[in-house]
Image (cartoon, rainbow, N blue to C red):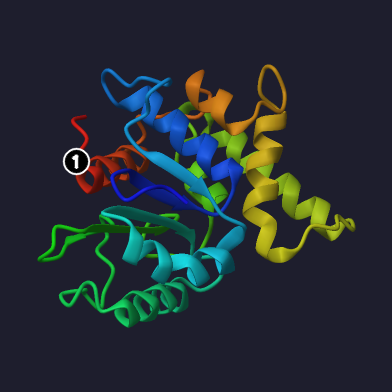
């Protein structure tokens, strides 16, 4: 766990860390990969984040949480809210998550932020968020990829229904040049657009939370 003088962002896994690092690298002026402005902590999935919230809130001065809504945005936010309320650290915690992500500061100067993937309002996950970064010129190919995934499911593809967004984005990436780039490379090469509106909104949330000059 990081020391309290660092700015720490909790994420569900390594893929989230790579995506967020790439977005910062492409969007924050003067970003230095050797000395990044925040420390990104990879935990072991959503349940581990929820379990760890009270410990991190008490030990950190600036803490951010990025977590997937999965199939239930409101239920996910309720779980986070209850964990945060239990700590008694942020008495002015809003009951509704702002569309721009939560950024709040308490009387002791502690800063807290929450972003529920994909967009603080609907169900989904990191891969749902990444679909918003597909360039407009690729819209028809994206629709074709989603249709192919639907047909593959009918033909016996084994992915679970709640992983359909993952199947969609990976199928679309398989049709790029070169096929199957990982998310970080796709963002850095602008196969996925780092300046898409939702990406810019996310980076602004990060910068507001951790007081990073963008």
Residue 30 located left or right of residue 138: left
Residue 47 vs 204, above or below: the answer is below
Residue 213 located left or right of residue 23: left
Residue 87 vs 126, above or below: the answer is below
- Quadrant of the rendered image containing residue 86: bottom left
- Residue 42 locus on image (x, y percent): 54, 48
- Residue 153 locus on image (x, y percent): 81, 57
Residue, x 65% and y 35% (percent of image)? 172
- Quadrant of the rendered image containing residue 5: top left
Q: Report the front residue among 194 and 102.
A: 102
Mark 1 neighbour class, 10 Å CA radius: few under 14, some 14 to 19, many 20 or more: some
Residue, x 26% and y 20% (percent of image)? 29
Residue, x 15% and y 75% (percent of image)? 92
Q: Report the front residue among 157 and 86.
A: 86
- Residue 152 locus on image (x, y percent): 82, 51
- Quadrant of the rendered image containing residue 197: top left
Secondary element under disc 1, as helix, strand or loop, is: loop
- Residue 91 locus on image (x, y percent): 17, 77
Q: Report the front residue among 200 and 154.
A: 200
Q: Report the front residue among 158 and 75.
A: 75
Determine which residue is flagged by label 1: 211
Residue 123 vs 8, above or below: the answer is below
Q: List the single residue furthest toward the right.
A: 156
Q: Quadrant of the C terminus?
A: top left
Residue 101 vs 48, above or below: the answer is above
Q: How many marks?
A: 1
């Amino acid at each position: 766990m990081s020391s309290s003088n660092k700015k720490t962002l909790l994420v569900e896994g390594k893929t989230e860390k790579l995506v967020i690092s790439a977005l910062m690298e492409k969007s924050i002026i003067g970003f230095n990969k050797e000395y990044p402005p925040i420390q990104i902590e990879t935990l072991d999935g959503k349940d581990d984040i929820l379990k760890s919230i009270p410990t991190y809130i008490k030990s950190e001065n600036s803490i951010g949480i990025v977590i997937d809504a999965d199939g239930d945005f409101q239920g996910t936010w309720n779980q986070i809210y209850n964990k945060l309320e239990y700590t008694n650290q942020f008495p002015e915690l809003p009951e509704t998550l702002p569309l721009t992500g939560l950024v709040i500061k308490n009387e002791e100067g502690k800063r807290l932020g929450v972003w529920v993937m994909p967009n603080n309002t609907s169900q989904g996950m990191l891969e749902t968020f990444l679909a918003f970064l597909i360039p407009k010129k690729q819209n028809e190919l994206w629709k074709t990829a989603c249709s192919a995934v639907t047909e593959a499911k009918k033909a016996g593809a084994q992915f679970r229904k709640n992983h359909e967004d993952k199947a969609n984005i990976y199928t679309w990436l398989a049709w790029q040049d070169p096929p199957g780039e990982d998310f970080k490379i796709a963002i850095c090469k602008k196969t996925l657009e780092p300046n898409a509106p939702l990406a810019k909104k996310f980076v602004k949330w990060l910068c507001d939370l951790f007081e990073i000059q963008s």
